Amino acid sequence: MPGLADLRDRVAPQCLCPPPAIGWGPLGGNDAAANSDAAAKGIICMFKNLSTTGLGISGVESELIELALTYKFAGVEPDFMELFHRAEEKGVPYARRLIDSGKLKLGTFRLPIEWNDETRYAKDREKLEKIASRAAELGSTRAVTLVSPSSDERPYHENFEFHRRRLAEIGQVLANHQIKLGIEFNALADARAGAAFEFIHNFDELRKLAAGVGVNGVGVVIDVFSWFVGGGTMDQITSLTVDEIASVQLCDVPADVPADQLTTKNRLLPGETGVIDSVEIVKWLSSIGYDGPVTARPDRNRFPKTGRMQIVKMVAESLDEIWTQAGLASVKPALVAVAG
């Protein structure tokens, strides 16, 4: 099996934008303008990101990073708390050694606190500052969190105000460390069935919440599956500014299943049917200079009895095809053997 250094030397960069000196977007001050200028010059700022957890793939960190390098991903999403504890015990350089060896970026990390429950948040709130500080040191600059589409306790308007205040508090702590907070939603009807009160379950509502938070650095996750299920339109996406976007998750859906009957098991590889136009979305992201992760999010059940190397290969090929159709430079996978 090739070493990380061997693989690293065979990887062409997927992101040609220089990293911002301080933060990104409104946190750094001039990044939106810089990214727009880069886009005008044809420089691709966004990067293909591999989330092995989202694909149901497990393994030691070195093996997963080798998979990412083999198939030319420029970003990865290791287990954040594992990375956090490793940094606590042995220091940040040690925790990042394999990531740095592969010259990889970090994609997003799921915010590891329970903020929707008052009792649990009272305990987790004390950890937030330390988590944010350590995440910044590790180079994890994009956190994500899910907003529940229903509540048994709070009516919509009361719940909106609760979320606005709570996410503003969390977002400000993260922003102090130059970390963006992306909020995402669940559009599936089953997720809010039987609840006393419905809450955010379409993209317009999500964007209103992000804007209502009122903290620079709080934006949205463009998960095209939830966007599509929630009746999304391209205008909803293309009306976003680059500073409003925390991360992007691509997939496709079957052509013969109505949107209101889709389930998570219907998440296909990007471009598999063309029902969701990932090519147009990627073209638009490139045109505005989006410099964050783009992650393929098919359902893990799409790959029964399939080895992890083949899964990553299929995901990489789907993103490569989207890049090619969007007129962006792509890189073919290296022909190396990785144990799977």
Image: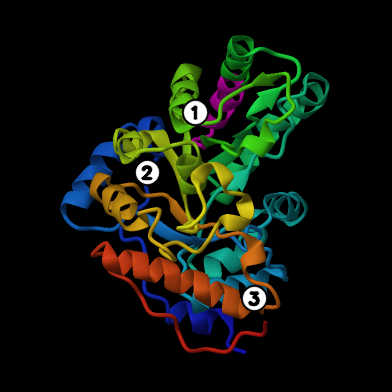
**Pointer 2 or 1: first along the chain:** 2
Residue 30 location (% of width, % of height): 29, 35
Q: Residues within 10 Å of mark 3 (few under 14, many from 20)?
A: many
Disc 2 marks a residue whose amino acid type is Ala
Q: Is residue 222 in sight in this rendering?
A: no
81 falls in the magenta region: no
The residue wearing badge 1 is 206
Count numbered badges in the picture. Answer: 3
Q: Helix, strand, or loop for circle 2? A: loop
Q: In the visual, does 80 lie left or right of 258?
A: right
Q: In the visual, does 113 lie left or right of 270?
A: right
Q: Are marks 2 and 3 in contact (CB under 8 Å)?
A: no
Q: Is residue 49 above or below residue 196?
A: below
Residue 288 location (% of width, % of height): 26, 44
Q: Helix, strand, or loop for circle 1? A: helix
Disc 1 marks a residue whose amino acid type is Leu
- Range of magenta residues: 167-180
The residue wearing badge 3 is 308
Q: Residues within 10 Å of mark 1 (few under 14, many from 20)?
A: many
Residue 225 is labelled as: none
Q: Residue furthest left?
A: 41
The residue wearing badge 2 is 21
